[in-house]
Image (spheres, rainbow, N blue to C red):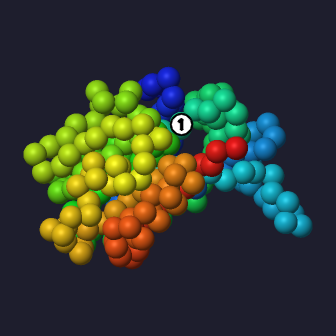
Amino acid sequence: MRRIHDQFVRIEFDYGSEEIESHGFDDVLVLCFPLVLSTGAKPTESDGVHDYATREYSVQCLDTKNHLVTVDFLVHQHGVATRWAQNARPNQRLWCIPPRMCKGFAEASATYLFADPSALPAVSRFHSEARETPGHTVLVDAQFAKGTLKSSPRRGLTFLDIQTPADRLIEASGLGGSSEPESSFIWIAGEAHWVSGLRRALVQDYAVNKENIQFTGYWKFG
């Protein structure tokens, strides 16, 4: 475990002999956090009551040779996952559900990402593995990541405030023009209300096919 930023802790898990695959930049790994002091026992459910809480995380890196999967934890003031990550010790066991794949990315002719800091692990993986993919990345409230993410001749990168209106976010990405191919893939992730508002604007105001949009609310205000 190591702190890679004031807001992120990186933890590497050894998944032993289990079979894990990860093909997409936003493949989701479900981790099961114990609600009481961890004994390493498998999570249980009795009469609909769980002794664990589940949280979804992007796979930062999958090392199949050494059977290691890396996850970046966004540290909040509260929450079962934050408490676990800040107190994690070597060889401590955590149960998980294997990653599920991102949809539609492989066939896209251009990819547009819209994200807040909670989605930075997925964005970071995309920029390390597919930075030459045509399109644009728009990040809100993530100016601290300017030194770690890079643009390329085929891919733009813009940092804005989360209060920026949806139309300005979309215009900053270059989306909405008549020259955009119908096979473009749009990925939106972050605070739930922000994500749904941006998707609504793309569909209603810019006539983007909703089938081309994948959106995920990683967290919610309040």
* Nearer to us in this view, 115 or 90: 115
Which residue corresponds to the image point at 28% horizontal and 53% vertical from the top-left? 171
Q: Which residue is mark 1?
A: 74
The 10 Å Cα crowd at callout 1, few under 14, some 14 to 19, many 20 or more, is many
The answer to whether residue 26 is above or below residue 213 is above
Q: Can you give x and y, in whole percent of width and height, for residue 197 in the image? A: 50, 58
Which residue corresponds to the image point at 45% horizontal and 25% vertical from the top-left? 5
The answer to whether residue 159 is above or below residue 138 is above
Locate the C terminus by quadrant.
Answer: top right
Q: Can you give x and y, in whole percent of width and height, for residue 30 in the image? A: 58, 55
User: In this rendering, would 81 be left or right of 217?
Assistant: right
Seen as rendered, the residue at the extreme right is 47
User: In this rendering, would 222 be left or right of 175?
Assistant: right
- In which image quadrant can residue 86 be found? top right
User: In this rendering, would 103 be left or right of 40?
Assistant: left
* Nearer to us in this view, 117 or 164: 164
Which residue corresponds to the image point at 25% horizontal and 68% vertical from the top-left? 184
Residue 184 visible to an observer of this rendering: yes
Which residue corresponds to the image point at 34% horizontal and 73% vertical from the top-left? 207
Q: Can you give x and y, in whole percent of width and height, for residue 145 in the image? A: 35, 31
**Mark count:** 1
Report the amino acid beneath label 1.
Answer: Leu
- In which image quadrant can residue 38 be found? top right
Seen as rendered, the residue at the extreme left is 153
Q: Can you give x and y, in whole percent of width and height, for residue 180 in the image? A: 19, 67
* Nearer to us in this view, 52 or 196: 196
The answer to whether residue 60 is above or below residue 18 is above
Residue 65 visible to an observer of this rendering: no
* Badge 1 element: strand
